[in-house]
Image (cartoon, rainbow, N blue to C red):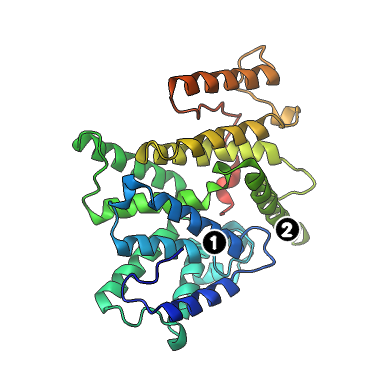
């Protein structure tokens, strides 16, 4: 978990603060609750412990990343940014429709620090406080799904440039480079459920879908257009999960796998297995057809072909994450996780 020794932190006060943070996660949320916050933080703790990156970041940067994970969804209302903006929610008005939830999570976490009995950072010098606050803000704002594609592109450019300049080794010399990669790690952990064992992944999928359905119920009551994946009367769980993996999770984790090779290969293999589980269960109907499939191939042939490629790569010791794409990227990027 979070090491409260970084930056002259008072451990008892820090523990008291984290108890308050946990209490301000909404227990009624199927997905965005304290368990999700803890899961993201633990995932980040694992990645930052790999030898390939543990010497890259400073102690305060590691602390900021773990802290950001812990508070990144505090006081989440179980609704998306789009819903808050479309309903003129007071938070959307306050933050001018810009990263509404992410800004709210940050403001909530730092507001608690203003309370004397919860101010675990009281012994940190002002420069350190300002630097820590800046890092946490940058890291949490990077979890906004609307920033996913630009963040991914920037990380790829940084990693490739660094390895070219340093004979294949990852060397992040500037603060901006380190923070960019750290943002990618935190964001990867926020959407990491698909890289975990199937029972865990299925449990998290059921939770997020139910939360989306609850939002859809409210949208229906308000006479609004239902957001993607929020209509419990027209489910598309299997297709949405394949799309989310193909177009969101996989590209980011492949980049992370290159960054941390070979430490993420097991996660990438699990990601492929989970993808195939949902792919094989996509209902055979016109709205779920695979328009990019080779003519004459049926679903079973596609699955067998993918499994054959995976096994061949496993024998060669290569990455096993070659995944067939479906007809279009699901609009799940608009549903902030």
Assess disc 1: are there few (<14), some (14-19) or many (≥20) residues with their C-alpha within 10 Å of its C-alpha: some
Circle 2 residue? 214
Assess disc 2: are there few (<14), some (14-19) or many (≥20) residues with their C-alpha within 10 Å of its C-alpha: some
Residue 207 against residue 244 in the figure, above or below: below
Q: Secondary structure at mark 2?
A: helix
| Residue that appears at 51% across and 69% down | 104
Q: Position of residue 60 (x, y in %)?
A: 31, 65
- Which residue of the protein is positioned furthest toward the top in this rendering? 296
Q: Secondary structure at mark 1?
A: helix
Per the model, the C-alpha gap separating discs 1 and 2 is: 23 Å
Residue 205 against residue 3 in the figure, above or below: above
Q: Position of residue 271 (x, y in %)?
A: 55, 37
| Residue that appears at 41% across and 82% down | 119
Residue 121 is drawn in which quadrant? bottom left
Circle 1 residue? 38
Q: Please indicate whether residue 99 sits to the left or right of residue 81 in the image.
A: left
- Which residue of the protein is positioned furthest toward the bottom in this rendering? 116
Q: Please indicate whether residue 193 sits to the left or right of residue 59 in the image.
A: right
3 or 70: nearer the viewer: 3
Res. 92 in view = yes
């Amino acid at each position: 978990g979070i090491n409260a020794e970084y930056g002259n932190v008072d451990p008892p006060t820090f523990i008291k603060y984290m108890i308050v943070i946990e209490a301000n996660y909404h227990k009624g949320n199927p997905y965005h609750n304290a368990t999700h916050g803890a899961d993201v933080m633990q995932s980040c703790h694992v990645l930052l412990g790999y030898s390939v990156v543990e010497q890259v970041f400073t102690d305060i940067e590691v602390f900021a990343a773990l802290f950001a994970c812990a508070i990144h969804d505090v006081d989440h209302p179980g609704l998306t940014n789009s819903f808050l903006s479309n309903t003129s929610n007071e938070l959307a008005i306050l933050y001018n429709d810009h990263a509404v939830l992410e800004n709210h999570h940050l403001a909530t976490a730092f507001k608690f620090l203003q309370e004397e009995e919860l101010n675990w950072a009281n012994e940190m010098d002002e420069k350190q406080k300002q630097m820590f606050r800046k890092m946490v803000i940058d890291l949490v704002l990077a979890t906004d799904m609307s920033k996913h594609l630009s963040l991914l592109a920037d990380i790829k450019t940084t990693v490739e440039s660094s390895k070219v300049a340093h004979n294949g080794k990852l060397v992040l010399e500037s603060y901006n480079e380190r923070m960019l990669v750290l943002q990618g790690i935190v964001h990867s952990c926020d959407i990491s459920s698909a890289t975990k064992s199937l029972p865990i992944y299925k449990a998290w999928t059921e939770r997020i879908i139910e939360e989306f359905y609850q939002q859809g119920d409210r949208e229906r009551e308000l006479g609004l257009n239902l957001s993607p994946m929020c209509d419990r009367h027209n489910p598309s769980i299997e297709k949405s999960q394949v799309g989310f993996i193909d177009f969101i999770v996989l590209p980011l984790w492949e980049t992370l796998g290159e960054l941390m090779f070979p430490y993420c290969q097991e996660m990438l293999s699990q990601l492929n297995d989970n993808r195939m589980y949902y792919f094989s269960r996509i209902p055979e109907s016109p709205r779920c057809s695979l328009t990019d499939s080779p003519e004459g191939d049926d679903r079973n042939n596609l699955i067998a072909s993918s499994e054959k490629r995976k096994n061949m790569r496993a024998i060669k010791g290569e990455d096993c994450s070659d995944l067939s794409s479906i007809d279009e990227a699901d609009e799940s990027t608009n549903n902030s996780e």
